[in-house]
Image (tube, rainbow, N blue to C red):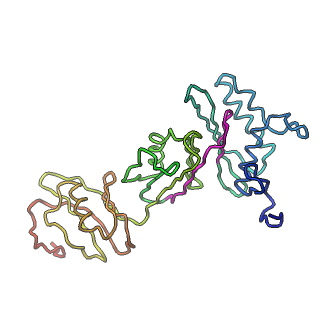
Amino acid sequence: MQVSDIPTKNWQLDLNNTGKVVTGYDDIQQCIALILSTRKGEDPLRPDFGSDIWKWLDKPLSASIPNMKREIIQALQSYEPRITIEKILHELDTTEGKSNVILGIIYKTGENYTGTFQYSLKQDTTPLALSASYLPDAFLYFIEMSLEGGEVTPASPQNGFLSINEMMKWVHQFWGNFGNWYLLIQENKVIVYINTQLGASGKLAITSVTGELHAPFPERYDLMNYNVVLKKEGKRISPWPSEGFETENEALNFVSQQYKDYGKWILKDNYLVLIASEPLDGYTLEINLLTKGAFSSDFNEDFEI
């Protein structure tokens, strides 16, 4: 590769791959790693380059954590002017009888890009970082993750999540042991740094469902049944049972069989949801109540009282 082939002036040699260069986000990540892993005085030509984070390694946590964060801020402000630190989070890793502070640095670049960098004083290798983007205004979210070619367990809920915050709450509870998770709201992105002993390859995927119809189940009283009404261009799609359904699961089973060509049907909280397999322009979905035995199978829906 010739220097003239590099499309940006911000680049450096890749320290992990001989003959290659890193640019953009990877360039910044490598610079941060170099700054924080270099002790001041180790570079004789630049004795002030690096940080003094290591000085706080064996100090009490109440003193070491705030001072580590201060050292990080000072070092990066001095030697990586392309970024502005937004926040530094910390966690204490006590697995396998060790005590190790893990610091998550959230920063912004001049192009208003938000990035993260995870640093540990005792880290021997760079952790695997997986990321996935999402659409902020979707109705439902599904998340999947695999490590070393196998799906992680437990599997995420089949009926998904109504919000990213709901999804992240579940992730921290059930997948928190896989690594450290970060939600970058402004970038509409989720990042996880996988614990190094769990694998060196993996995949994270978030599906944002926007092509859907949903309707809430109304409060049902005695002698009343649910009436599911799916229409196209104002005309009800057949078949439909004249007596309706006593339970939400009965309604789900019916639409999953009779209306399966329109997509996948699920129950989510108080909603019946159709995740479309085709465009839903002109389609509507509603659920109302029918009095049991009030109508015969010959009832004409177009009849107006």
The residue depicted at 78 percent of the width and 62 percent of the height is 8
Q: Is residue 208 magenta?
A: no
The residue depicted at 42 percent of the width and 59 percent of the height is 139
Q: Position of residue 288 (x, y in %)?
A: 23, 61
Q: Is residue 182 left or right of residue 42?
A: left
Q: Is residue 123 magenta?
A: yes
The residue depicted at 47 percent of the width and 44 percent of the height is 171
Q: Nearer the viewer, residue 31 or 14?
A: 14
Q: Position of residue 227 (x, y in %)?
A: 20, 62
Q: Quadrant of residue 9?
A: bottom right
Q: Is residue 270 left or right of residue 148?
A: left
Q: Nearer the viewer, residue 92 or 97?
A: 97
Q: Is residue 131 left or right of residue 21?
A: left
| Vertical position of residue 147 compared to residue 47: above or below | below
The residue depicted at 25 percent of the width and 62 percent of the height is 287
- For the N terminus, the image quarter is bottom right
| Vertical position of residue 57 compared to residue 14: above or below | above
Q: Is residue 25 left or right of residue 198?
A: right
Q: How many marks?
A: 0
Q: Quadrant of residue 244?
A: bottom left
Q: Position of residue 85 (x, y in %)?
A: 70, 45
Residue range of the region highlighted in magenta in the rendering: 116-136
| Vertical position of residue 167 compared to residue 41: above or below | below
Q: Position of residue 305 (x, y in %)?
A: 15, 72
